[in-house]
Image: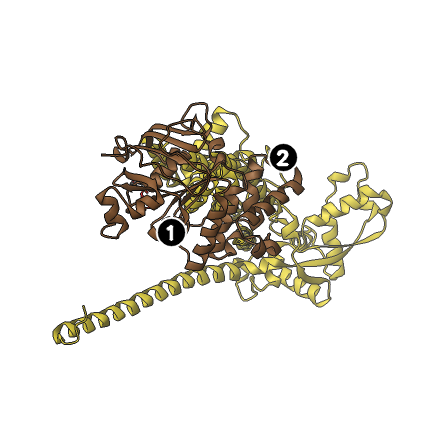
């Protein structure tokens, strides 16, 4: 009963650059194309046959009850599951038409193109500057110190953190508040100029004010990046995303424009989850 | 749970609370008791060692003039002259004691001054033969037994036959002291000399240098091998039956008695590979083998303690696994790794049994010239001196133990300092 047979929801006009979500591969607007993705942890199947197209320059929200496989799916996209012993992924995932699981793809390069922000802010135990400079440094994106400093500054500005930290770049990254740390790791992710940013519950540990700042930031970033965000907050999904996908028990139950999912879900399970009747 | 209306259950919970408090107090008491016992043992140990060994840090020297009588010095065979005897006769003359026909008194006087005096006279003549016929003044250590008398460890009240020094000798020593010829001072010879057959000339320098060289060899081999093995096992090795097997065996190796490593070293390095016996190189290799399992275990524990979120962050940034480990995980684990390394090397420093197996018990005067030449090391030096017949060596045993302990305290202090430095929280 997964998305496999489901026709993609009726055509939706997204607010940002229009995306015809049902058009299959090679559409200019589709950034990530997933076809029949299943994931296993040892013998246990965590994802069943997920097919979804994720548009560029838009925010796609993954919602669903705990343990339904949202994080697992996110990790399939940048092959972070490779690092878990016993984890296995089948099916096809393409970014810009390129199979991420192809032999020719180096996961190290892939992950530099697909940035990830984790549920818990995890700055490196180094200075703020070093946190942001690390990616450009290992990927050789900067020629010399001046360029590196420019990248760090631009990334921190984009992440809306520059004003707060510009005078203490060489202090510890973990001396920042939780919300600042989350923006720091976002700055770190965008410093390598990824094409896609995956965010796994980026606001789960934050207060409403910090959350609002991150959401503003996501809205800002959406003009340039393809963003996927996992969230447990229906309100957040409704606020920041243009498209929403609902997962349940390892299956993709329903996907469509955020407006449709929230106002007019087609599946009873989606309706129940959104209205808080289970979860 | 605590229903106010339900009296019996409330009683019960109050009773339980009391029990919990009592248990807590009891446990605290046991803990404090354990600390007191441990500290007690430590104090007894240290007090005993210090009480026995502190006297070695000061010693007595005598200043004596020797008339180099041309009639009694054979210029053709300088080495053949008995300058000690000559000096002893001078000493007696100074004390206005008439020597007997057999020269017994001179013989006894000779036993009061270090044999170093004879070598010093010989050296002076070799430097400049013109000194023959003049009177030279030398300051040299007194002989170990005389030193013990000045320190009060040989007493006049002991019957003469049970004593190392005769009544006559004690009288002379008293008079020399009264005349201000004897001076008590810091025993720097103990730190600048190596082992010697004469207790008053035996020092720890050779053993300290030997220990340091051996430790360097051990660290040079065990640290990189141990840390890299741990990194591979912890971060790269596929989890499977093989890695489980390796893990169990490393834990077993850490528990193997050190003497077995000595035996292994004897067979492997000396008998098969032809390494020199009694050399810091061979000893260092044996200690490296012995420290490896401990270093691996400590390093793995430190790596395990690094939160996985840091690994995820680095991998998520597109760092390779090697970069993740060397840029983030290992620096984060560094304090733990360092502590493990230093503690295991400090342990190796005090190891005696395996070194006895590879022949490090040899008497080695002088400093080791190379890693492959014979050397003595501190713990073995302690062992050798403790087994020596002369009482004066026993004082040195305790002195060497103190030096060994100070060496270890310095190493552990380094561990603490390194830890503080690297633990600079980010
Ligand atoms: N490393 C792992 N090893 C084994 N099973 C795992 C692992 N990670 C996740 N799982 C299992 O896979 C399923 C999906 O987990 P996942 O983390 O993707 O859920 P999630 O939707 O992100 O949940 P949450 O909202 O609580 O974060 C769960 O049943 C979980 O137990
Ligand atoms: Mg999750």
| For residue A238, side relative to residue B369 (left or right) | left
Badge 2 is on which residue?
B370
- Against B331, residue B88 (above or below) is below
Q: Is mark 2 within 8 Å of ligand 1?
A: no
Inspect this view and state whether residue B394 appears: no
The colour scheme used to paint the residues is by chain
Q: Residue A194: image x %, image y %?
A: 50, 37
Secondary-structure class at tag 1: helix
SS class, disc 2:
loop
> Is label 2 or label 1 in front?
1
Query: In front here: B167 or B223?
Result: B223
Q: Would residue A103 be seen by someone viewing this image from the given angle?
A: yes
The residue singled out by tag 1 in the image is A236
Are labels 2 and 1 on one chain? no
Q: Chain of mark 2?
A: B
Q: How many marks?
A: 2
* Residue in the foreground of this view, choosing between B284 and B276: B284
Disc 1 C-beta below 8 A from ligand 1: no
Identify the residue at image location x=23%, y=72%.
B18
Question: Callout 2 environment at 10 Å: few (<14), some (14 to 19), or many (20+)?
Answer: few
Q: Which mark is residue B292?
A: none
């Amino acid at each position: 009963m997964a998305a496999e047979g489901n026709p993609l929801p009726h055509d939706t006009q997204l607010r940002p650059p229009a995306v015809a979500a049902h058009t299959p591969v090679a559409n200019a607007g589709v950034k990530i194309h997933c076809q029949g993705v299943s994931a296993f942890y040892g013998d246990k199947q965590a994802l069943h046959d997920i097919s979804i197209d994720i548009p560029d320059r838009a925010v796609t929200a993954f919602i669903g009850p705990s343990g339904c496989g949202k994080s697992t799916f996110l990790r399939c996209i940048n092959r972070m599951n490779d690092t878990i012993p016993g984890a296995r992924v089948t099916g096809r995932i393409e970014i810009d038409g390129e199979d991420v699981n192809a032999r020719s793809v180096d996961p190290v390069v892939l992950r530099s193109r697909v940035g990830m922000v984790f549920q818990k802010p995890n700055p490196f135990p180094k200075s703020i500057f070093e946190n942001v400079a690390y990616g450009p440094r290992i990927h050789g994106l900067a020629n010399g110190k001046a360029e590196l400093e420019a990248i760090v500054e631009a990334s921190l500005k984009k992440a809306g953190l520059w004003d707060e930290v510009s005078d203490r770049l060489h202090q510890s990254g973990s001396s920042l508040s939780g919300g600042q740390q989350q923006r720091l790791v976002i700055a770190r992710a965008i410093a390598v100029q990824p094409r896609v940013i995956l965010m796994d519950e980026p606001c789960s540990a934050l207060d409403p004010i910090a959350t609002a700042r991150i959401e503003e930031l996501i809205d800002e970033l959406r003009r340039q990046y393809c963003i996927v965000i996992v969230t447990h907050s229906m309100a957040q999904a409704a606020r920041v995303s243009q498209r929403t996908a609902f997962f349940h028990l390892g299956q993709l139950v329903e996907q469509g424009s955020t407006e449709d999912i929230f106002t007019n879900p087609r599946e009873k399970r989606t309706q129940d989850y959104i209205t808080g009747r289970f979860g | 749970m605590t229903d106010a209306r339900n009296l019996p259950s409330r009683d019960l919970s109050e009773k339980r609370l009391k029990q919990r408090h009592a248990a807590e107090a009891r446990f605290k008491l046991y803990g404090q008791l354990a600390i007191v016992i441990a500290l007690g043992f430590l104090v007894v140990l240290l007090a005993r060692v210090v009480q026995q060994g502190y006297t070695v840090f000061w010693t007595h020297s005598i200043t004596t003039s020797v008339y180099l009588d041309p009639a009694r010095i054979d210029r053709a065979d300088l080495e053949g002259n008995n300058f000690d005897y000559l000096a002893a006769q001078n000493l007696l003359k100074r004390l206005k004691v008439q020597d007997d026909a057999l020269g017994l008194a001179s013989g006894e006087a000779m036993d009061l001054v270090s044999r170093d005096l004879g070598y010093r006279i010989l050296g002076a003549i070799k430097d400049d033969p013109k000194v023959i016929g003049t009177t030279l003044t030398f300051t040299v250590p007194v002989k170990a037994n005389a030193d013990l008398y000045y320190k009060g460890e040989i007493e006049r009240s002991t019957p003469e036959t049970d004593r190392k020094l005769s009544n006559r000798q004690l009288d002379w020593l008293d008079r020399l002291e009264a005349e201000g010829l004897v001076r008590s001072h810091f025993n720097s010879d103990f730190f600048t000399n190596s082992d010697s057959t004469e207790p008053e000339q035996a020092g720890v320098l050779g053993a300290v240098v030997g220990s340091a060289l051996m430790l360097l060899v051990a660290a040079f081999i065990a640290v990189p091998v141990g840390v890299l093995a741990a990194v591979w096992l912890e971060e790269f090795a596929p989890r499977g039956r093989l890695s489980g097997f390796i893990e169990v065996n490393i834990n077993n190796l850490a528990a193997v008695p050190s003497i077995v490593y000595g035996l292994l070293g004897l067979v492997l390095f000396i008998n098969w590979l032809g390494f020199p016996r009694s050399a810091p190189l061979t000893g260092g290799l044996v200690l490296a083998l012995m420290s490896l399992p401990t270093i691996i275990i400590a390093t793995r524990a430190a790596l395990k303690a690094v939160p996985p979120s840091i690994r995820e962050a680095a991998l998520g940034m597109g760092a390779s696994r090697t970069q993740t480990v060397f840029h983030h995980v290992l620096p984060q684990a560094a304090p733990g790794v360092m502590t493990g390394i230093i503690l295991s090397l400090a342990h190796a420093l005090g190891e005696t049994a395996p070194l006895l197996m590879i022949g490090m018990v040899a008497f080695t005067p002088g400093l080791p010239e190379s890693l492959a030449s014979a050397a003595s090391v501190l713990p073995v030096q302690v062992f050798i001196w403790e087994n020596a017949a002369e009482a004066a060596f026993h004082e040195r045993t305790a002195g060497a133990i103190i030096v060994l302990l100070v060496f270890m305290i310095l190493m552990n202090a380094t561990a603490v300092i390194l830890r503080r430095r690297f633990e600079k929280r980010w």
